[in-house]
Structures are given as C-alpha cells and as structure tokens.
Amino acid sequence: MQGILIINKPKGFTSQDTVSKVKKILNVKKAGHTGTLDPMATGILPILIGNYTKLSKYLIEHDKTYIAKIKLGEKTDTGDSEGKVIEIKEVKKENLNEENLTNAIKSFLGEQLQLPPIYSAIKIDGKKLYEYAREGKKVEIPERKIKIYDINLLNFDENASEIEFEVSCSKGTYIRVLCENIAEKLETVGYMKSLVRTKVDNFKLENSITLDELEKQSENPNFLENKFIKMEDIFNNYPKIILDNRKKELFLNGVMLSFDLENGIYNIYNDNKYLGIGIVKEKLLKRDIIL
C-alpha cells in the first residue's frame, strides 16, 4: 500500500501523532508528512505512505494557504491560544472597521523578513528553540525571508476584538508571528486564536479525509483507491520518456542513459506502465524515484 493521503488533521494532534495514527489504521510500516502543522491547528496534512516518503523533497517546499483568527488585546508567550497571557493592551474601537483592518492586513503583502517565534522547532546550535524557551534561556534568532502572495480580511467581530483572515504564503511563514504583527499595526497586541490550513500547493481541504473517516473505510479498497494520490498525478505536467525493455532494465539498475533532452524531471514509462521519475542532466537520464 502506497500513495499520498490528504488528512484533515484534528486539533490537539501533532503532525507525528497523525502519521502514527495513519500507520496504525492502514497497518503500514513506512509513512511520513511533508511539513509540520501546529498541534492547535487543523487542516491539510499530506501523508506519504510506502515508497512515497521519497517524494518529501519535492513536496516540502510547497506554498500554503491558511485561515487564521486573531484575538486582539492580549499577547501570549507562545503567540497562540495555548500560551500564558503576558500582556494586555487596549484595542482602539476606531481601528476596528473594514477599511483600517484591510489596510493593516494588506500591508504585509510581498517579500519580507520574519523573526521566528521562540516556541518553534527551528534548531539553533543543534537545539530546538522551544527547548531554550522552556529553560528560560535567551538565544539570538536570525530573521528569515518569507513571502505573502495574497492576504484578505474575511471577517471581524468588534465586540470580541477578533479578526479572521486568509493568507497564501511561502514555506517557513509563521502565522502566529503574522498575527502578532497585524495586531501591532492596529496599535495593540494579539495572538493567533485558531488556524486552519486549507491548501498545500494543489492539495485542497475539500479533498481531504479525517482520521475517523479513514478508520471507518480502512477495509474498503474502492474508498482507498479513490483517496490515494499517485506519483503520476503529482508529476502530470512533466514530460514523458518511454523506455524499451532493455533500457528499462538498465534504468532500474541505476545505469545512466543517453537522451538528447533538456535538463529536468521526466516521467518514465515502459510501454504503458509507469515506473517513476528520472532526471536528465547534461544529456544523461538518471533514476530518481522508482515505485
């Protein structure tokens, strides 16, 4: 059993918890995910099963889309609703109108530097930042370049001092930090109250399944067949190379084959059978990922 499952991760589960649950439900030994989603967040978590774990290097860099809610007027030590409130600040009601909120949110469009939160899994000198935080130690955190492709106000509640927005961004963007920065633009403080990841590249939330659904349908081969995404679907925009039987054997054995083609990724076939992907570099085809 192998392929990609798009799981709608439940709140309270770590990404690794979700992988372990999928492995148990499907009784598979090898599985992984393509990028951590905070335990408090819900939404898309692509799970790679079997030899598809080798695809991680192609999927981990993908852009993502989220829907987030900010609670204004309070700041927490973790930047989200699971932290301890460390600051309270007035929320100016005159700032909570559609025009001001839209302008504040839109000001974050484009490339920028972002300072990752101390409560994160980024490693400094071989140690995760949240480990320094738990020990009460200070550490210099380098800023990272991120890009906000699109960001839009979805809703706001003046009485509750809450804002909901949708953002499409590059890998490595911390939405918790973005929420805090938006609050600062509104002359107050804030934290991320909720987060839903709705899209990872072409994987969409509406095509995902819950762990409960997977458990109920785990013995239904037709259901699984329809839900598994295959490598051929992932790379369907890349060109094909069709190998005869002799070249197929050489290719599968790791022998580089001469092809007068441009450098890049190619789908490899033997007759109508999909073998996987190969990479052409300087007129030589090299095996990359084979199923």
Image (cartoon, rainbow, N blue to C red):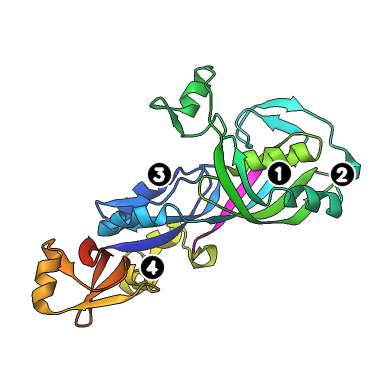
3 and 1 marks in contact (CB < 8 Å):
no
The amino acid type found where label 4 is placed reads Ile
Looking at the picture, tell me which residue is in the foreground, 196 or 107.
107
User: x, y (%) of residue 76?
Assistant: 66, 30
Q: Disc 4 on helix, strand or loop?
A: helix
Q: Residue at x 21, y 66 (%)?
A: 285
Q: Residue at x 12, y 63 (%)?
A: 255
Mark seen at residue 204: none
N-terminal label among 1 and 2: 1
User: x, y (%) of residue 4?
Assistant: 36, 62
Q: Quadrant of residue 99?
A: bottom right
Classify residue 143 as left or right of residue 25.
right
Is 258 rendered above or below residue 133?
Answer: below
N-terminal label among 1 and 4: 1
Magenta segment main secondary structure: strand
Query: Mark 2 = which residue?
Result: 95
Query: Mark 3 = which residue?
Result: 17
Q: Which residues are magenta?
A: 193-201
N-terminal label among 4 and 2: 2
Q: Residues within 10 Å of mark 3 (few under 14, many from 20)?
A: few
Q: Quadrant of residue 262?
A: bottom left
Q: Nearer the viewer, mark 1 or mark 2?
A: 2
User: x, y (%) of residue 45?
Assistant: 46, 54
Q: Which quadrant is the N terminus positioned in? A: bottom left
Q: Which quadrant is the C terminus positioned in? A: bottom left
N-terminal label among 3 and 1: 3
Mark seen at residue 70: 1
Query: Mark 4 = which residue?
Result: 234
User: x, y (%) of residue 284?
Assistant: 21, 65
